[in-house]
Image (cartoon, helix red, strand yellow):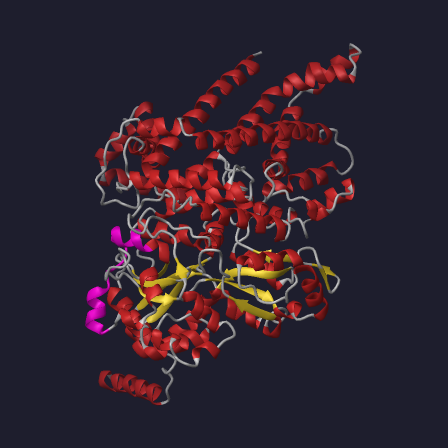
Amino acid sequence: MNELSASSRITYRAVMVRPGVARRIRGLSDRTLAWLFITPTIVLLLAINIFPLLWTIYLSFTNYRANRANVPTIWLGADWYQSILTDPDIWAAMQVTAHFVIWTVVIETVIGFGLAFLIDKKFRGHGMWTTIILLPMMLSPAVVGNFWTFLYQPQIGLFNYVVAFFTGRDASSFQMLGDVRLSPWAIVIVDAWMWTPYVMLICLAGLRSIPDYIYEAAEVDRASKWRQFWSITLPMALPFIMLAVLFRGIENFKMFDMVNLLTGGGPGSTTEVASITLKRAAFESWRTGYSSAFAIILFVTVFGLANIYVKALNKVKSR
Amino acid sequence: MKPTFKTLVVACGAVVSAFGLGAGTTPAQAQGKTITLCWAAWDPANALVELSKDFTAKTGVGMKFEFVPWTNYADRFLNELNSHGSLCDLIIGDSQWIGGAAENGQYVKLNDFFTKEGISMDDYMPATVVGYSEWPKNTPNYWALPAMGDAVGWTYRKDWFARPDVQKDFKAKYGRDLAVPKTLDELRDIAQFFQGREIDGKKVYGASIYTERGSEGITMGVSNYLYDYGFKYDDPKKPYAMDGFVNSPGAVKALEAYKDLYKCCTPPGASNSYMSEGLDAFKSGQVALQMNFFAFFPGLHKDPNVGGDKIGFFVNPAGPAAQATQLGGQGISVVSYSKNQPEALQYIKWFSGGDVQKKWWALGGYSCAKSVLNDPSFPNSAPFAKEFLQSMGMVVDFWAEPSYAQLLQAEQKRVHDYVVADKGTAQEALDGLVKDWKAIFKEEGKKF
């Protein structure tokens, strides 16, 4: 007896054992079958995403504290929202976050696109250079935070020595992480170092998607390289650049690990980004209701900004 | 066949037993019970592992340890307690946790157990009982057994102080001999004297002090100045009334003095420095003075580069109003979510024993038992023993309220903003702190 006939026999036997089930499955519509497949995913999504979100929204209107579960929960209405939105410390944290997000996105986009443009030229060894450039983004943010702390060390840190070499200043005469003027830039530099390759990769994909015949047509029309860049390269790579900006913007808005390791929010509160403030409220002070309200405000902010941005991105793509 | 086989198995078992082949099995394994003790990852924890081997040998209860670095210690274990986790059967929790842990039912109340087992709190140093065991403070409600006495002290480079050229320069500059500082002003002079000085061809710095922002560092450091200048957490006659006590003129001067010490006399890049950074700075020969907890002093004394005759120890010097120091250390508690409470209590009973406490000190832990500390030989038992004893007699602790973490965060922010980030004045920082603390206590429903 060959294999085919053996499997047929098994199927036959199954049908014989439970004919009702088989008939029912055979009779399912495509729609029902689709629901059957996606239901587990939807249930999982509801359990780990939607329910916690709804629960957080509920908690944000209460005095609940996770460390005092035996204290009666009182409904506070929008008190937390009002207190957060009128708290100067929160606005200071938002300003720090905005500074961090704007500068990292600008620097990463400019340098990332520049690198992609160069790598796209396919020079000798470009594959090796691409790999080398990509190395920082393959590291864990915890590792990056720790070793940049050493690089920034004023007495033994390589960064200070490099700056001293080029500027002639004493290496230990300035401290990147302990100075209020320099520390916001110190975290921007580390993030740019780590994530510029990511932006480069997306931009490279954009540049490689531009068909060669367009450039050939431009050459025939005697368009200069400068003109080709502004009229072909940039407009056609723009949706990719915008996508990279969106990804980095969202990521950096919720940046926590690297900044926490580098400065812990200091000196003072100079680099206390919103997520550090949120973590302190939620898991050090255990003000669960308050931190839930803050988390919702941050969520709405990111969600709103991202939506506006995606609409702009779609407009650019449809051009 | 069957009886013959059975006889063979029994005989084999007898032979194995007779030759002691099962001797490697510990009583713990025999009994099958193991308890987990949670603490910070540092030198005394290693001493406790060594000490606890005696407990296992005596009782047959195995010990597991969960040690977390200081920077994550509070986060990790408060999360564990707040989520009603049963990872830890025993916890050596920070002194400030006691209020929250007691009020939230996270620690087992030990009064009945102490009475039943004849453990008396009179047998322990009063400061450690108040600091590590009682909640509410100064009431006979015990939630922990004082386990690890600790306070902030100072180390100095004895070998540098002893150099004739250094002594000569110091006398020429300050008109007095270079010696262990008795006041905070003297300490500042010494730190300034060493700042930027060349010793053996290497540039050295004055002092390593606590400036850490993220957890509790700068608060644990600045407190040693605040207390000495007359700072009080609240009105002794009216609890939680803080105006004029937290932001008193003395407290303002203390904050200014701490900032002055940070600006004039610390190594470059010391803007986020706590225990391990202080140890690094001292061990690498960068600084003449180091502020740190006594718990590290046994290790420092053994250090091949800066230990032995090269290191000296002194208590926090006096200020214009008082001489006090920040309490460190912890008590050992039984976690109320533990499934092994009888064994955990058994450990506490064993740990309270006089001989165990003596061995604890000998191994590098700081006993809080009077039987150890009041022993006439104690002050000479280690180069830092006398200073430790003196410090434990003048300790003050931070708030131990259930809301301590919020109170701590507020001070961390206000003090770091002023001392390190140059934001505002000392008066503004302390006025802001009073405002923050009032808001926290108001939210807690306190009347003041």
Residue found at x 48% / y 63%: B42
Most common secondary structure along the magenta stretch: helix
Residue B68 in the figure: left or right of residue B241: right
Q: Is residue B110 magenta?
A: yes
- Residue B409 image offset from top left, x and y in percent: 42, 44
Image quadrant occupied by the N terminus of chain B = bottom left
Residue placed most toward the observer, B291 or B274: B291
- Choose top left, top right, bottom left or bottom right for residue A236: top right
- Residue B374 image offset from top left, x and y in percent: 38, 76
Residue placed most toward the observer, A279 or B323: B323
Residue B109 in the figure: left or right of residue A157: left
Residue placed most toward the observer, B72 or A230: B72
Where A258 sits versus B24, above or below? above
Residue farthest toward the front in the current orientation of the protein: B175
Residue found at x 26% / y 68%: B345
Where B389 sits versus A76, above or below? below
- Residue A24 image offset from top left, x and y in percent: 25, 30
- Choose top left, top right, bottom left or bottom right for residue B114: bottom left
- Choose top left, top right, bottom left or bottom right for residue A198: top right
Residue placed most toward the observer, B400 or B12: B400
- Residue A102 image offset from top left, x and y in percent: 57, 27
Where B165 sits versus A246, above or below? below
Magenta residues, start to end: B98-118
Q: Is residue B111 magenta?
A: yes
For residue B301, say whether it is visible. yes
Count of numbered marks: 0
Image quadrant occupied by the C terminus of chain B = top left
Residue farthest toward the top in the current orientation of the protein: A221
For residue B26, say whether it is visible. no
